[in-house]
Amino acid sequence: MAIFAPLMLPVERRLQTGAVLVWIAALGMSFIAFFYLCTIRYLWPFIIIYLLWTLMVDQAPEHGGRRSLLWRNWIGWTYFARYFPMTLIKEGDLDPSKNYIFGYHPHGIISLGAVCTFGTEGLGFSKNYPGITPHLLTLQSNFQIPFYRDYIMAMGMASVSKQSCERILNSGPGNSITIVVGGAQESLGAKPGTLDLTLKKRLGFIKLALVNGSSLVPTLAFGENDLYELYSTDHTSKMYHVQQCMKNVLGWTMPMFNGRGVFNYEFGLMPRRKPVAIVIGEPIHVEKVEGSPSTEQLEALQKKYIDALLGIWDRYKDTYAVGRTQDLQIIE
């Protein structure tokens, strides 16, 4: 296979690459833009006001973000979905008079399927689920990064804190949240051809569903782990301990991975062009529990959720995971 991309490619492919680059480069470009503006002295008063506003005043990340329908419907997100390509498989309708918690699996390296499905209209979420307003949740620390915070809030993203989740779920019919359940720990096992889920100890979103009476919607992305090559580290290695320390201190960690570049196919931060099929399962109805749910209630609902997730895997694995090296595993 050629290492470098041909100079002459269809405009469609260039647009697809450009759309994905807009997302991949957003964090780095936000830092560059901010520090560049800091070199312009007459902008300092405005920068100080902006920082004070974002760090001390603005509570939008805890209140559902600052969604922009114009940004979510940007034509570039359609090209983003076509790059891989990504497809959405809908298993059932959702009642817009209710609230839902979508559990997205797996985390992968940077959860690109979750971004495309719930953070944009690239796959037509609103057309498939009219009346449902999704909020993709991420770490609060992401909302402390100048400019980047505004970029992701315009996509409808919000903080994954307990207070934020409950405010969204109780802010009116149809308001729903998406939690990438496996988190940073799961990203360390995102090997191509596998689907190892960190789920057994994840009871926070189960409790959230019971306390708020919100139905659970299992969502499984076939191919998410195939978008990057993961350099796995042994659990006894120094690198693994560094990654765990990062996770404990910062809430996120950095797996060692490789993708492709804009003009080459062998190395870079761009994801590889691999198909991703996002299956949104049937909702699991949850009765609201007054007070604190018991251990038995938590475990019973968790089992029902895991069974539904395994059911999705069994129904679609021979269609969308043909090249798998192993079946889905729930490792911890």
Image (spheres, rainbow, N blue to C red):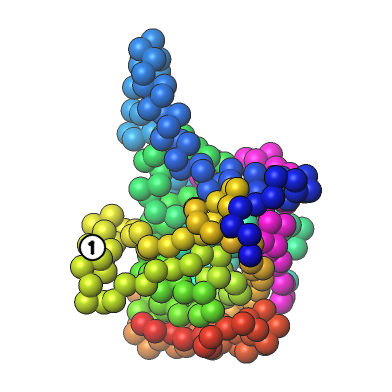
Taking the image as drawn, is residue 215 in sight? no
Give the left or right position of residue 185, taking residue 114 as reference: left
Q: Is residue 208 above or below residue 80?
A: below
The quadrant in which residue 234 appears is bottom left
Q: Which residue is mark 1?
A: 242
Front residue of 144 and 20: 20
Quarter occupied by residue 272: bottom right
Relative to 209, residue 39 above or below: above
Residue plotted at (46% across, 60% down) = 258
* Res 190 quadrant in image: bottom left
Give the residue at x 78% y 48%. Answer: 10
Q: Quadrant of the C terminus?
A: bottom left
Q: Residues within 10 Å of mark 1 (few under 14, many from 20)?
A: few
User: Is residue 154 shown left or right of residue 237?
Assistant: right
Tell me what residue is drawn at x 63 percent, y 65 percent. 1
Q: Does residue 260 show up? A: yes
> 146 and 218: which one is in front?
146
Q: Position of residue 154 (x, y in %)?
A: 57, 41
> 268 or 125: which is nearer to us?
268
Above or below, comparing residue 278 to residue 4 in the picture: below
Q: In the image, which residues are magenta?
A: 65-92
- Specify whether residue 211 is painted magenta: no
Residue drawn at 60 percent across, 48 percent down: 263
Amino acid found under the numbered disc labelled 1: Val
Q: Is residue 229 left or right of residue 132?
A: left
Count how many numbered circles sit on residues in the image. Answer: 1
